[in-house]
Structures are given as C-alpha cells and as structure tokens.
Image (cartoon, helix red, strand yellow):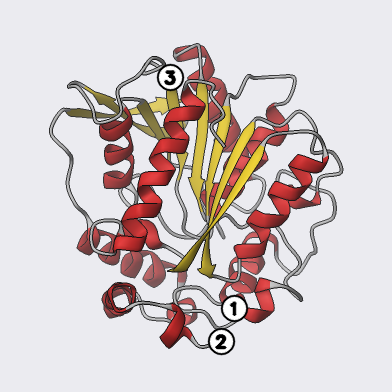
C-alpha cells in the first residue's frame, strides 16, 4: 500500500506529531507506561473548551461520567437540542478516559447544542470483558432515566464497539434514536479484507488490533457475542439508525462497511462513509487537517440529524 500517495502532507504532519508522543511500538510498553504516554499525547492535542459550554463531572450508578451542556446559541441550532449524546471514548479498551476525548466532547456539545455525557468505563487488563460493556450499558440506563427523551450513542474506535454493542443489547429495553460510529472495531475477520491490505497502516496496525484483542479477551475467539463483537450477532433487525465513518488507511475500515451491509440486509437504515486518505485516530487532527475537519463536520451533521430523528442519507 503506497501511503505516501494516499496520505496528504497535512495528515503526515499529524501522524509525525502523534508518533513524537506515542510511538508506533507503544504496545511493547507496560500498560502503565502506555497509559502515561497516551495521556501525554492527548494533552498535546487538547484544544480547550469552546465558550458557552459548561462541564461537570458526575456518577452514573458507579460509572464516572462527564457532562457537557451548551449555555449559548450554537452553530447547529435546531429542534431536538435537549437530546443527549452518550460518548464512548477510544483507546483499545486499554488507554483513555474522561480527559482523553475531553475537547472532542466539548466541541460536539458546542456545535450541535446537544448535551453530551462521556462515560469513563473500566479498562483492561484489570477489568476484562464484559466490564467495559457493562459500564457502557449502565451509562445508557442512567441517561435514559435522568434525561428522558432522545438518546444518540457516539463512539470512536473501541468506543464505537461499545456504542454498537449497547445498541444491539438495548433493543426492546431502552430506546436509542441513533448511533454514530467513528472508525469502530466491530469484531471483523482479521485474516482478510482491510485487515490484510492495511495491516501496516500508520497509527494502527493489524498486529496492534490483535494486541488489544488479546488484552481484552486473552487467546479466546469471539463466537456470537455481540456485547464483545457486534458483527458476530445473528440478528441485525431493529437496530437504531446508524451512521458509520471509517478511515481509508485503517485495518478496521471493512468493519464499518460490513456493519452497514448487515443492517441494511435486515431492513434497517445505515449509512457508511469511508474517508479517503485518513488514518485511525483522525479526530485529533480535526483542526489541522482539512480532510479530518471535513469528516468531523459530517460527523456533527449526522449526530444532529439523528438527535432530531431525521434520516437525510
């Protein structure tokens, strides 16, 4: 794969800056070192809070959460602004937390006018599956009781996995208006497709995907457990409206396409966008890379539309 041609200079600058803080071989570090290094990298990209967003920490039946609410008129101001977005952060189920995606959540709140609740789910290896899923599910239940009404689930990478897993589990239990998944890992076959063609992609390799899988699940394969790998579900009917964004240069890209296809085959509404020339983790590049900014704009439009229970795709 000729990444020199696929990836533009702005994206390469983002990749190099990321690697200055979080090297490509970070998975050989201890878990404690990985977390420290990842946190340092996230702070280097932190863009602060927009004016007009209030932020406070809370507790969702034992799960730490951070709540973002708009206090001023926002860029996307439409009916449904009292809806709630639940955000599940990425990090391979190993790193990340309320601070790692703090400014992303604040910007979603500011530009959509929606309440955003970020969930600080338990991490591996101290808390193997299903701990993260249980915390993600607990957060949805708490939000549905605390702010009844429209709820949209959003997550990137591992968080996209959790958003989808919760959507599958919520059918017939708790209403979910929609989900927006950003370069999610959904449990696809790591021996084919984008896992092979982009096995050595910058920012995330297939080897690293296998590492995160091993930390969460050990050596066991996942068989029909949608709480761990939504693509292994036998039933894709009745899922909320789903919009999936993937990066072209990412081993996880085919997971998003396959997920869209299975929802559509079951009669549901799903839309997939593969962002050309982008890499895993591009949300942190939204202010410096035009392609990433354009994708983030599309993500915000999707969140806003789902919060109004609209389907413009």
Helix, strand or loop at mark 1: loop
- From the image, which quarter does the N terminus lie in? bottom right
Query: Which residue has dot 3 on it?
Result: 83
Helix, strand or loop at mark 2: loop
Q: Is residue 282 left or right of residue 53?
A: right
111 or 185: nearer the viewer: 111
Question: Residue 276, how many percent across, how many down?
Answer: 48, 66
Question: Dot 1, how many residues are within 10 Å of its Cα: few (below 14), some (14-19), or many (20+)?
Answer: many
Q: Disc 1 and disc 2: Cα gap in Å?
A: 7 Å
Query: Which residue has dot 2 on it?
Result: 1
Q: Is residue 174 visible?
A: yes
Q: Is residue 118 above or below residue 297?
A: above
> Residue 223 lies in what quarter of the image?
bottom right
Q: Is residue 254 above or below residue 139?
A: below
Q: Is residue 88 above or below residue 5?
A: above
What is the count of numbered marks?
A: 3
Do the numbered discs 3 and 1 sit on residues whose CB atoms are within 8 Å? Answer: no
Q: Earlier in the sequence, mark 3 or mark 1?
A: 3
Q: Residue at x 30, y 28 (%)?
A: 76
Q: Residue lying farthest left?
A: 51
Q: Disc 3 and disc 2: Cα gap in Å?
A: 42 Å
Q: Residue at x 42, y 62 (%)?
A: 281
> Residue 170 lies in what quarter of the image?
top right
Q: Earlier in the sequence, mark 3 or mark 2?
A: 2
Q: Residue at x 34, y 74 (%)?
A: 22
122 or 22: nearer the viewer: 22
Do the numbered discs 1 and 2 sit on residues whose CB atoms are within 8 Å? Answer: yes
Which-is-in-front pick, marks 1 and 2?
A: 2
Question: Dot 3, how many residues are within 10 Å of its Cα: few (below 14), some (14-19), or many (20+)?
Answer: many
Query: Which label number is shown at residue 198?
Result: 1
Q: Disc 3 and disc 1: Cα gap in Å?
A: 37 Å
> Residue 147 lies in what quarter of the image?
top left
């Amino acid at each position: 794969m000729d990444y020199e041609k696929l990836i533009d200079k702005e994206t390469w600058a983002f990749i190099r800056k990321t690697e200055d803080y979080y090297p490509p071989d970070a998975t050989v570090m201890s878990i404690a070192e990985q977390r420290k290094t990842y946190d340092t990298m996230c702070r280097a990209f932190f863009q602060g809070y927009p004016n007009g967003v209030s932020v406070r920490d809370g507790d969702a039946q034992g799960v730490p959460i951070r709540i973002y609410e708009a206090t001023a008129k926002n860029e996307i101001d439409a009916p449904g602004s009292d809806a709630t977005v639940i955000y599940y952060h990425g990090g391979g189920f190993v790193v990340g937390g309320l601070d790692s995606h703090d400014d992303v959540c604040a910007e979603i709140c500011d530009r959509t006018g929606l309440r955003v609740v970020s969930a600080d789910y338990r991490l591996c290896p101290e808390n193997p599956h299903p701990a993260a899923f249980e915390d993600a599910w607990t957060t949805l239940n708490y939000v549905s009781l605390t702010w009844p009404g429209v709820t949209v689930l959003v997550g990137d990478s591992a968080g996209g996995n959790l958003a989808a897993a919760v959507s599958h589990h919520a059918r017939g239990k708790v209403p979910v208006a929609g989900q927006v998944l950003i370069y999610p890992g959904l449990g696809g076959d790591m021996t084919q497709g984008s896992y092979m063609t982009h096995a050595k992609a910058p920012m995330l390799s297939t080897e690293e995907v296998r590492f995160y899988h091993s930390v969460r699940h050990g050596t066991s394969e996942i068989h029909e457990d949608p709480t761990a790998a939504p693509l292994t579900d036998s039933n894709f009917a009745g899922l909320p409206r789903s919009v999936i964004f993937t990066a072209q240069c990412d081993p996880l890209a085919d997971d998003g396409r396959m997920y869209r296809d299975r929802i559509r085959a079951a009669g549901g509404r799903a839309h997939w966008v593969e962002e050309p020339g982008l890499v895993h983790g591009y949300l942190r590049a939204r202010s410096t890379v035009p392609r990433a900014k354009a994708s983030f704009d599309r993500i915000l439009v999707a969140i806003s539309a789902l919060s109004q229970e609209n389907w413009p795709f």
